[in-house]
Each structure stands twice: as structure tokens, then as C-alpha cells.
Image (tube, rainbow, N blue to C red):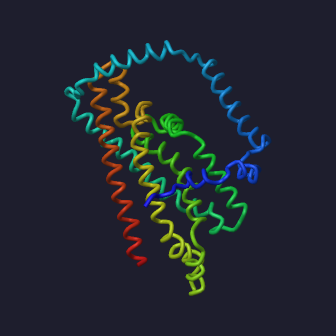
């Protein structure tokens, strides 16, 4: 049996009559299109101006691509030379910096995030002060915090830990407060009606709801902070970044390639492990609920 498609059905109907009948629906008025056209035009003009202002040149791109190809060729094959043990030690230091900075920041940010949540602290002054405090902390990039802490405590991994801790403290505080505010109030009301205090309501009514979200966020930032710890190591905060900067400065491209591969493999392993942990946490929570 022959099937009739929608387009064939519309062909049989007088499409001209349909357009006349629903002209207001099918046609977008010019007044509604002008804002969109204006935004696109202004954005395009700003992009063109920025490219011109900062000296965009196709010749530079072509020349740069040629030099990049030369560097890539010099990277093959990756070779650590006699620095393999030093590289492994530095990589472990980078992981330790990322781990300690991330998880200490999460522990410190949880109570502050609770203070910044409207459904936990109803006092507007406390809520406003907590939010602005977190905004001011997270408004400064990790690299800037690294430079600050290096001048405070000196060169080394301790400055890197403090840099990641400070930066993530502000970020976690905001994310945790938003997750807490999105929690359902009914479990809290049930705990309080059974004779529990407000703290008991937060512990047994809110935390079980938001904990999978918090764990997922912390694991994601741990993975991201492995890369951040590499960058801040370049400015003297310890870890494998210091070796990476030295090898690039000396044009030891085979060693640079080996270091990059080490970092990529480590990040991939952490991503796989964190995904398994997230699945276990969320899956376990689902089994408990069932």
C-alpha cells in the first residue's frame, strides 16, 4: 500500500490559502527581527574590529603553522632521557597538590555554602555577606592566587596547594549553596516535625539529597585541577609544570612531548576513575532509595 507523506498531503491542499489564513503566524514581523539582526551585526562588527586591532594576519597563521609543524617533528619520538624518575616524582607532586587543594577546599566550602543558601540561613545579612565573600574569592584566577601565595609562603608545592584551595573554596561555596537551595524541603520538615533541630534537618534532610551532586562536582574539579596544578607549577608552585617550563625553555622537544603525554594519560585515568566513583555514589543512592 502506498504511503502518503506529510509533504504530499500539503501538496494536495491549497497552500496559498493556508499562507493567507495563517500569514501572521508564518511571517515574523520586522520589528521582532530587527533586534536579532542588530545583535548579529554588532557582534560581527566587534569581531572584525578586534581582529584588525590585534593584528590578525593570514600570513602570520601560515608562518606559525609551518613553525608548529617543525616543533611537532622535533617532538618525535617522545623521550624522557635520564629524567624519568624525576618526572614521575614531579607528577606525583602535581597529583598531591590537586588532591589536597581540591578536597580541603570542598570541606571548608560546605559550611560556608550552607550559610549562603537561602533555605538554610534566612538572615539576609548573613546570606548577602556569604555570597559576596565567595564572589570575591572566586573572582581571582588560580594563577594569580599562586603568585600571591608564592610571595607569602615561598616557592614550592605548599603555595600550589594554597592557590588551588583558595580558588576552589570560592567556587565550591557558590556551587554547594545552589545545590542546597535546590533541595526538597519535605525531608527537612519531616525531620523537624519528628523532634529534630534545624541542624538535624540539614544533616539528615538536605545532605543526603545533594551529596551525589557535591561529589560529582568535587571529582570534576579534581580532574581539572590536575591541569591547573601543572600551570601554576610553571610559576614556581611545584609539580611537573616546573620541569615542563624548563624543557620548553631549553627546546628539549622530545622531553616536552613525553611530559605532555604523561599529563594526558594521567588526566584520562583520573577521568575514568572519577566517572566510576560518580556512578557508584549515584547508583548506591538509588539502591538505598529503592
Q: Residue furthest right?
A: 31
Question: Which residue is pictured at 47% across the width and 45% down the height?
Answer: 164
Quadrant in the rendering for residue 282: bottom left
Question: Which residue is pictured at 78% across the width and 40% down the height?
Answer: 30
- Identify the image quadrant of the C terminus: bottom left
- Identify the image quadrant of the N terminus: bottom left
In the rendered image, residue 42, in percent from the top left (x then y), is placed at 71, 30
Q: Is residue 128 above or below residue 264?
A: below
Question: Which residue is pictured at 42% across the width and 42% down the height?
Answer: 158
Left or right, residue 119 beside residue 176: right
Q: Nearer the viewer, residue 138 or 75?
A: 75
Left or right, residue 26 beside residue 55: right
- Total label count? 0
Question: Which residue is pictured at 29% across the width and 37% down the height?
Answer: 262
In the rendered image, residue 197, in percent from the top left (x then y), is placed at 58, 80
Q: Is residue 19 above or below residue 144?
A: below
Q: Residue furthest bottom?
A: 194
Q: Nearer the viewer, residue 23 or 248?
A: 23
In the rendered image, residue 19, in percent from the top left (x then y), is placed at 72, 49
In the rendered image, residue 150, in percent from the top left (x then y), is placed at 48, 35
Q: Is residue 77 above or below residue 199?
A: above
Q: Is residue 203 above or below residue 49?
A: below
Q: Nearer the viewer, residue 272 or 99?
A: 272
Q: Residue furthest left?
A: 82
Left or right, residue 99 beside residue 12: left
Left or right, residue 165 beside residue 41: left
Quadrant in the rendering for residue 83: top left
Amino acid at each position: 500500500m502506498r504511503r502518503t507523506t506529510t509533504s504530499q498531503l500539503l501538496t494536495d491542499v491549497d497552500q496559498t490559502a493556508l499562507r493567507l489564513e495563517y500569514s501572521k503566524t508564518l511571517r515574523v514581523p520586522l520589528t521582532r527581527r530587527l533586534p536579532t539582526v542588530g545583535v548579529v551585526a554588532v557582534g560581527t562588527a566587534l569581531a572584525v574590529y578586534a581582529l584588525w586591532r590585534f593584528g590578525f594576519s593570514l600570513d602570520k597563521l601560515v608562518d606559525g603553522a609551518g613553525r608548529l609543524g617543525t616543533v611537532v617533528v622535533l617532538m618525535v619520538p617522545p623521550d624522557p632521557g635520564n629524567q624519568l624518575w624525576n618526572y614521575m616524582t614531579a607528577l606525583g607532586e602535581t597529583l598531591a597538590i590537586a588532591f589536597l587543594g581540591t578536597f580541603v577546599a570542598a570541606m571548608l566550602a560546605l559550611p560556608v555554602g550552607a550559610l549562603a543558601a537561602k533555605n538554610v540561613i534566612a538572615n539576609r545579612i548573613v546570606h548577602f555577606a556569604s555570597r559576596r565573600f565567595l564572589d570575591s574569592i572566586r573572582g581571582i584566577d588560580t594563577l594569580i592566587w599562586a603568585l600571591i601565595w608564592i610571595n607569602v609562603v615561598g616557592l614550592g608545592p605548599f603555595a600550589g596547594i594554597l592557590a588551588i584551595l583558595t580558588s576552589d573554596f570560592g567556587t565550591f561555596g557558590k556551587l554547594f549553596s545552589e545545590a542546597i537551595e535546590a533541595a526538597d524541603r519535605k525531608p527537612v520538615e519531616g525531620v523537624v516535625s519528628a523532634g529534630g533541630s534545624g541542624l538535624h534537618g540539614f544533616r539528615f534532610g538536605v545532605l543526603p539529597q545533594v551529596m551525589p551532586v557535591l561529589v560529582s562536582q568535587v571529582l570534576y574539579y579534581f580532574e581539572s585541577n590536575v591541569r591547573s596544578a601543572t600551570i601554576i607549577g610553571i610559576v614556581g608552585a611545584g609539580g611537573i609544570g616546573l620541569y615542563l617550563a624548563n624543557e620548553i625553555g631549553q627546546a628539549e622537544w622530545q622531553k616536552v612531548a613525553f611530559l605532555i603525554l604523561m599529563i594526558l594519560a594521567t588526566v584520562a585515568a583520573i577521568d575514568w576513575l572519577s566517572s566510576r566513583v560518580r556512578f557508584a555514589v549515584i547508583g548506591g543512592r538509588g539502591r538505598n532509595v529503592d
